[in-house]
Amino acid sequence: EAGVAQSPRYKIIEKRQSVAFWCNPISGHATLYWYQQILGQGPKLLIQFQNNGVVDDSQLPKDRFSAERLKGVDSTLKIQPAKLEDSAVYLCASSPVGAGETQYFGPGTRLLVL
Amino acid sequence: GENVEQHPSTLSVQEGDSAVIKCTYSDSASNYFPWYKQELGKGPQLIIDIRSNVGEKKDQRIAVTLNKTAKHFSLHITETQPEDSAVYFCAASGRGGADGLTFGKGTHLIIQP
Protein backbone atom coordinates (compact mmCIF):
# COMPACT_ATOMS: atom_id res chain seq x y z
CA GLU A 1 0.00 0.00 0.00
CA ALA A 2 1.46 3.37 -1.03
CA GLY A 3 1.89 5.90 1.76
CA VAL A 4 0.97 9.57 1.96
CA ALA A 5 2.74 11.49 -0.79
CA GLN A 6 3.85 15.11 -0.47
CA SER A 7 5.59 17.51 -2.80
CA PRO A 8 7.81 19.34 -3.01
CA ARG A 9 10.13 17.91 -0.34
CA TYR A 10 12.02 21.17 0.07
CA LYS A 11 11.24 24.79 -0.72
CA ILE A 12 13.18 28.00 -0.17
CA ILE A 13 11.43 31.34 -0.69
CA GLU A 14 11.82 34.94 0.37
CA LYS A 15 9.44 36.60 2.80
CA ARG A 16 6.26 38.01 1.26
CA GLN A 17 6.38 35.42 -1.54
CA SER A 18 3.72 32.75 -1.90
CA VAL A 19 4.13 28.98 -1.77
CA ALA A 20 1.93 25.91 -2.18
CA PHE A 21 2.26 22.36 -0.91
CA TRP A 22 0.53 19.32 -2.30
CA CYS A 23 -0.63 16.15 -0.55
CA ASN A 24 -1.99 12.88 -1.91
CA PRO A 25 -3.41 10.74 0.92
CA ILE A 26 -3.52 6.97 1.11
CA SER A 27 -6.17 5.67 -1.26
CA GLY A 28 -9.57 5.47 0.36
CA HIS A 29 -8.71 7.61 3.38
CA ALA A 30 -11.57 10.00 4.04
CA THR A 31 -9.84 12.23 6.58
CA LEU A 32 -6.86 14.44 5.77
CA TYR A 33 -4.86 16.63 8.13
CA TRP A 34 -2.21 19.33 7.68
CA TYR A 35 0.24 19.89 10.53
CA GLN A 36 3.00 22.47 10.99
CA GLN A 37 6.18 21.28 12.75
CA ILE A 38 8.60 24.00 13.82
CA LEU A 39 12.15 22.83 14.53
CA GLY A 40 12.42 21.24 17.96
CA GLN A 41 8.66 21.03 18.54
CA GLY A 42 5.85 18.58 18.01
CA PRO A 43 3.51 18.90 15.04
CA LYS A 44 0.63 21.36 15.42
CA LEU A 45 -2.68 20.79 13.66
CA LEU A 46 -3.53 23.44 11.09
CA ILE A 47 -6.61 22.00 9.39
CA GLN A 48 -8.62 18.78 9.22
CA PHE A 49 -10.79 17.69 6.27
CA GLN A 50 -13.45 14.97 6.20
CA ASN A 51 -13.83 14.12 2.53
CA ASN A 52 -13.89 17.63 0.98
CA GLY A 53 -15.38 19.43 3.99
CA VAL A 54 -13.47 21.28 6.72
CA VAL A 55 -13.87 19.73 10.19
CA ASP A 56 -11.46 21.94 12.15
CA ASP A 57 -9.46 24.97 11.01
CA SER A 58 -9.35 26.77 14.35
CA GLN A 59 -5.52 26.95 14.36
CA LEU A 60 -5.08 27.95 10.73
CA PRO A 61 -3.83 31.57 10.35
CA LYS A 62 -6.52 32.44 7.84
CA ASP A 63 -5.07 35.84 6.96
CA ARG A 64 -2.22 34.11 5.13
CA PHE A 65 -2.91 30.35 5.03
CA SER A 66 -5.50 28.60 2.93
CA ALA A 67 -6.21 24.97 2.14
CA GLU A 68 -8.53 23.05 -0.08
CA ARG A 69 -9.35 19.44 -0.79
CA LEU A 70 -11.12 19.22 -4.09
CA LYS A 71 -13.05 16.04 -4.84
CA GLY A 72 -12.16 14.68 -1.40
CA VAL A 73 -8.78 13.29 -2.46
CA ASP A 74 -5.70 15.50 -2.99
CA SER A 75 -5.18 18.61 -0.94
CA THR A 76 -3.22 21.83 -1.35
CA LEU A 77 -1.99 24.13 1.42
CA LYS A 78 -1.02 27.67 0.44
CA ILE A 79 0.80 30.46 2.25
CA GLN A 80 0.50 34.02 0.92
CA PRO A 81 2.42 36.10 1.85
CA ALA A 82 5.02 34.06 3.74
CA LYS A 83 6.71 35.31 6.91
CA LEU A 84 10.02 34.28 8.45
CA GLU A 85 8.17 32.44 11.23
CA ASP A 86 6.51 30.16 8.68
CA SER A 87 9.80 28.28 8.29
CA ALA A 88 8.86 24.75 9.34
CA VAL A 89 8.08 21.27 8.08
CA TYR A 90 4.53 20.92 6.78
CA LEU A 91 3.20 17.43 7.35
CA CYS A 92 0.18 15.86 5.74
CA ALA A 93 -1.56 12.91 7.38
CA SER A 94 -4.57 10.79 6.48
CA SER A 95 -6.78 8.26 8.22
CA PRO A 96 -9.36 5.80 6.89
CA VAL A 97 -12.41 7.25 8.63
CA GLY A 98 -13.07 9.92 11.22
CA ALA A 99 -13.26 7.94 14.42
CA GLY A 100 -10.65 5.81 16.09
CA GLU A 101 -8.32 5.32 13.18
CA THR A 102 -4.56 5.73 12.97
CA GLN A 103 -3.19 8.84 11.32
CA TYR A 104 -0.49 8.04 8.76
CA PHE A 105 1.98 10.80 8.02
CA GLY A 106 3.76 11.74 4.85
CA PRO A 107 7.46 12.72 4.72
CA GLY A 108 6.68 16.42 4.93
CA THR A 109 7.70 19.53 3.01
CA ARG A 110 10.53 21.50 4.58
CA LEU A 111 10.00 25.25 4.03
CA LEU A 112 12.67 27.88 4.61
CA VAL A 113 11.62 31.53 4.41
CA LEU A 114 14.51 33.99 4.01
CA GLY B 1 -7.96 23.31 24.27
CA GLU B 2 -5.80 20.29 24.99
CA ASN B 3 -2.24 20.70 26.28
CA VAL B 4 0.27 17.84 26.33
CA GLU B 5 3.47 18.00 28.38
CA GLN B 6 6.28 15.52 27.66
CA HIS B 7 9.39 14.66 29.68
CA PRO B 8 12.31 14.35 29.42
CA SER B 9 13.33 16.34 26.36
CA THR B 10 16.48 14.23 25.99
CA LEU B 11 17.11 10.70 27.26
CA SER B 12 20.37 8.82 26.94
CA VAL B 13 20.47 5.12 27.87
CA GLN B 14 22.92 2.27 27.42
CA GLU B 15 22.09 -0.29 24.77
CA GLY B 16 20.07 -3.08 26.35
CA ASP B 17 18.68 -0.89 29.14
CA SER B 18 15.08 0.34 29.38
CA ALA B 19 13.80 3.80 28.47
CA VAL B 20 10.71 5.51 29.88
CA ILE B 21 9.06 8.66 28.50
CA LYS B 22 6.20 10.34 30.33
CA CYS B 23 3.37 12.60 29.20
CA THR B 24 0.54 14.45 30.88
CA TYR B 25 -2.56 15.92 29.26
CA SER B 26 -5.08 18.50 30.36
CA ASP B 27 -8.39 17.69 28.66
CA SER B 28 -10.35 14.97 30.42
CA ALA B 29 -12.35 14.43 27.19
CA SER B 30 -9.26 13.07 25.41
CA ASN B 31 -9.56 9.33 24.93
CA TYR B 32 -6.95 8.34 22.34
CA PHE B 33 -3.20 8.44 23.04
CA PRO B 34 -0.75 7.47 20.29
CA TRP B 35 3.04 7.46 20.34
CA TYR B 36 5.03 8.35 17.23
CA LYS B 37 8.69 7.84 16.34
CA GLN B 38 10.31 10.37 14.03
CA GLU B 39 13.66 9.84 12.37
CA LEU B 40 15.64 12.64 10.78
CA GLY B 41 14.06 13.89 7.57
CA LYS B 42 11.02 11.62 7.87
CA GLY B 43 7.43 11.97 8.96
CA PRO B 44 6.21 10.60 12.31
CA GLN B 45 5.50 6.88 12.36
CA LEU B 46 3.01 5.34 14.80
CA ILE B 47 4.63 2.80 17.11
CA ILE B 48 1.83 2.11 19.59
CA ASP B 49 -1.42 3.65 20.79
CA ILE B 50 -3.85 3.24 23.66
CA ARG B 51 -7.48 4.15 24.21
CA SER B 52 -9.09 5.28 27.43
CA ASN B 53 -10.84 1.97 28.11
CA VAL B 54 -7.47 0.22 28.41
CA GLY B 55 -4.83 0.73 31.13
CA GLU B 56 -1.87 -0.95 29.45
CA LYS B 57 -0.89 -2.22 26.03
CA LYS B 58 2.22 -4.09 24.95
CA ASP B 59 3.79 -4.87 21.59
CA GLN B 60 7.04 -6.83 21.81
CA ARG B 61 9.62 -4.46 23.42
CA ILE B 62 7.24 -1.50 23.57
CA ALA B 63 4.52 -0.88 26.14
CA VAL B 64 2.27 2.05 27.00
CA THR B 65 0.44 2.67 30.27
CA LEU B 66 -2.44 5.07 30.85
CA ASN B 67 -3.72 6.58 34.11
CA LYS B 68 -6.90 8.49 33.28
CA THR B 69 -7.42 9.68 36.83
CA ALA B 70 -4.01 11.34 36.92
CA LYS B 71 -4.15 12.26 33.21
CA HIS B 72 -0.80 10.79 32.37
CA PHE B 73 0.54 8.09 30.08
CA SER B 74 3.98 6.61 29.56
CA LEU B 75 6.01 4.81 26.91
CA HIS B 76 8.31 1.98 27.98
CA ILE B 77 10.96 0.54 25.67
CA THR B 78 12.85 -2.50 26.96
CA GLU B 79 16.10 -4.02 25.69
CA THR B 80 16.90 -0.86 23.73
CA GLN B 81 18.77 -1.18 20.44
CA PRO B 82 20.74 1.37 18.36
CA GLU B 83 17.85 1.60 15.87
CA ASP B 84 15.61 2.89 18.68
CA SER B 85 17.52 6.19 18.55
CA ALA B 86 15.05 8.83 17.30
CA VAL B 87 12.67 11.53 18.52
CA TYR B 88 9.53 10.19 20.18
CA PHE B 89 6.28 12.15 20.43
CA CYS B 90 3.24 11.48 22.56
CA ALA B 91 -0.12 12.86 21.49
CA ALA B 92 -3.71 13.07 22.64
CA SER B 93 -7.00 13.29 20.80
CA GLY B 94 -10.69 13.40 21.56
CA ARG B 95 -13.56 11.45 19.99
CA GLY B 96 -11.53 8.28 19.92
CA GLY B 97 -9.01 9.71 17.49
CA ALA B 98 -11.43 11.49 15.18
CA ASP B 99 -10.08 14.85 16.28
CA GLY B 100 -6.71 16.15 15.23
CA LEU B 101 -3.80 15.22 17.48
CA THR B 102 -2.21 17.50 20.08
CA PHE B 103 1.45 16.57 20.37
CA GLY B 104 4.02 16.91 23.13
CA LYS B 105 7.33 18.60 22.36
CA GLY B 106 9.18 15.34 21.85
CA THR B 107 11.93 13.29 23.50
CA HIS B 108 15.25 12.75 21.78
CA LEU B 109 16.21 9.19 22.71
CA ILE B 110 19.89 8.36 22.36
CA ILE B 111 21.04 4.75 22.65
CA GLN B 112 24.67 4.55 23.73
CA PRO B 113 26.54 1.49 22.39
Image (cartoon, grey):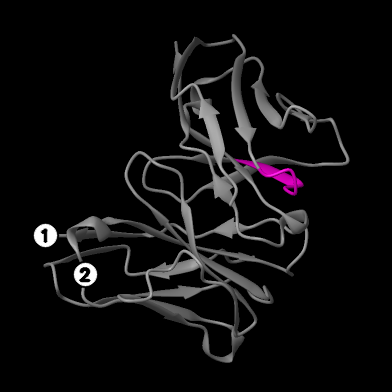
Q: Which mark is residue A82?
A: 2
- The magenta span reads B27-35
Left/right of residue A63 with respect to residue B82 in the rendered view: left
Image point 55% across, 67% down: which residue?
Answer: A33
| Subunit bearing disc 2 | A
Q: Nearer the viewer, residue B76 or B24?
A: B24
Tell me which residue sits at (60%, 48%) in the image.
B2
Label 2 residue SS: loop
Where is residue B8? Give x, y as percent. Answer: 49, 21
User: Between A28 and A51, which is closer to the camera in this rendering?
Assistant: A51
Inspect this view and state whether residue B23 appears. Answer: yes
Q: Residue at x 62, y 12 (%)?
A: B18
Does the magenta-highlighted stretch encompass residue A92? no
Q: Quadrant of the C terminus of chain A?
A: bottom left
Q: From this viewpoint, is residue A26 visible? A: no
Q: How many discs appear?
A: 2
Residue that extends furthest to the right in the rendered view of this protein = B53
- Taking depth in this image into account, of A70 and B17 the one nearest to the observer is A70
Q: Is residue B106 above or below residue A92?
A: above
Q: Amino acid at mark 2?
A: Ala
B28 in magenta: yes
Identify the residue position indicated by label 1 in the image. Answer: A114
